[in-house]
Image (cartoon, grey):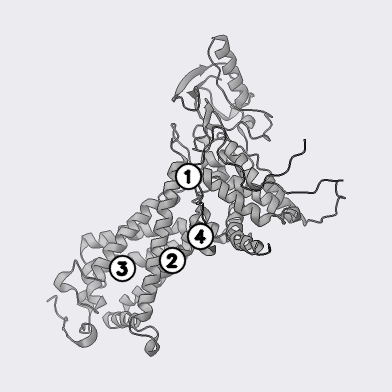
Amino acid sequence: MATTTPARGSQSSARGLVRPTFSQPRRRLPYPFGLYQTAVGKKWVMGVTGIMMMGFVLVHMIGNLHMYEGPAKYNEYAEALRTVGGALMPREGVLWALRLGLLGAAALHIHSAATLTIINRRSRPLAYQSPRDYSAANFASRTMRATGIIVLLFVIFHLLDLTWGVFLGEDYITGDVYNNVTRSLSSLPIALLYLLANIALAVHLFHGAWSMFQSLGWNSPQFNQARRVFAAAFAGLILVGNLSFPILNLTGVVSQDSRTTPCVAEGGEETRICLGVNE
Amino acid sequence: MRITLKVWRQDGPTAPGSFETYDVPGVSPDMSFLEMLDVVNDRLTLDGKRPIVFEHDCREGICGSCGMMINGVPHGPERGTATCQLHMRKFHDGDQIVVEPWRSAAFPVIRDVAVDRSAFDRIIEAGGYISTPTGAAPDANLTLIPKPVADAAMDAAACIGCGACVAACPNSAAQLFTSAKLAHLNLLPQGQAERWARTEAMVETMEEFFGSCTNHGECREACPKEISLDFIAMMNRDYVKSKRKNRKLLSQIR
């Protein structure tokens, strides 16, 4: 019997017992935005935004190493961040552009993760009734949601603590980063919180920095072996760098006592001498 | 060998199911897993009970019918084999073996451990074919294909559509199946004409039924044909590309 091939997608996908759990939107958004309406596209967005945030995490860690050069250099670095672009850019212009970019990346990353999680939960309404024996999924890959949420909550805490100075009160001095960091981290509970959050971040990166290669389709026999190594090295580097801050503050290697220069409030309208505050 | 078999029994797609335990003496280590189930079913039939419903066909590991969860692992403890190629010598005397159907919204249970895998057919219908003109068979060696390309396409084509990847995936995603089916056509010259339309259609049909990939790699471990995760990366790359390519192709129509 002669039949003609039906046009692609002309048949209904719901036949027999099987029902779709997710229906593709009837109207697709125009070209690059339509990608975000699909699960594979959302994973691609997660990969790209993940790279943006990895870049931030790396630069943030390296930048904070200036802490070990003493208060003068560290505060100079903080000031340099506000004047990136020199006279060509308004003060804090580049900084705010980067901040908004990161905020957008984080929002997309979280939104994709949340919506994909909903799809995944719906795809297996009845879980396995006998214990599952996983052989490839590791601790990092299976705790991505938990570590992601820990990192998100920590970032909110970290901004409240050191950008707005909510918890330091009187001790917070706008523009004197060295003062703020050392005061905050010399408290044991806060230092422990930083330790925990950065371990969660490293675990998240260990899977994420590998997973992004797959999501973005960066696959070649020439570098496939290096992808795992890269992810482990990146996560390890961030872990060691970021853990050193609370540990060295807690042990007193970096502290208020080691400062040799007076700190100055931002803008120079009000100058507070904070040398000897500890005495 | 004497084993204890704990099997999921369910009367129909909407009926509630539960595990039932059977004591199975007299199992030969040379039996395949399905032959062991045959023995159990013979005994159940003689006792006037309903035998365990499981799907099977070729029993030589190439049809993909016989998937089931054995002790929490798709197709059981032996890697790179389907359930029918798993032998009882992989177990020990006195073991308890738990058998459960694939769990996924896209794979409703028909009865006991047999599931309906027609969601895979929906994906294939969306583009898992090439439209060839009918007529005499083309000359051999008319279309030259480099050996590495032919090998890669063959590796992808080894997929038997058993559903173990979906069953193994913590998200119930069908990325390994879909990417294998895409790669086996998309790598070859014959598949190029429809490559981008195929990629878009098959991925979007897949997403209607299955979860989303989080790159655990469980599917690769469960796959009786050991299909590589590299195909998933290729599919992800091709899908994003297909959105752009198909937009361009649309503009050819006047």
| Residues beneath discs 2 and 4 located on the same chain | yes
Q: Is residue A222 visible?
A: no
* Residue that numbered label 2 is attached to: A54
* Label 3 vs 4, first from the N-terminus: 4
Crowding near the residue tagged with mark 3, few <14, some 14–19, many ≥20 C-alpha atoms within 10 Å: many
* Residue that numbered label 3 is attached to: A245
Q: Chain of mark 1?
A: B
In which quadrant of the rendered image does the N terminus of chain A lie?
top right
Q: Amino acid at mark 4?
A: Leu
Task: Verify CB contact (< 8 Å) between mark 1 and mark 4.
Answer: no
| Residues beneath discs 1 and 2 located on the same chain | no
Residue at 66%, 62% (x, y): give it: B249
Q: Is residue A24 visible?
A: yes
Could you tell me how far apart the alpha carbons at marks 2 and 4 are, in whole angstroms? 29 Å
Q: Residue furthest bottom?
A: A87
In front of the other: label 1 or label 2?
1
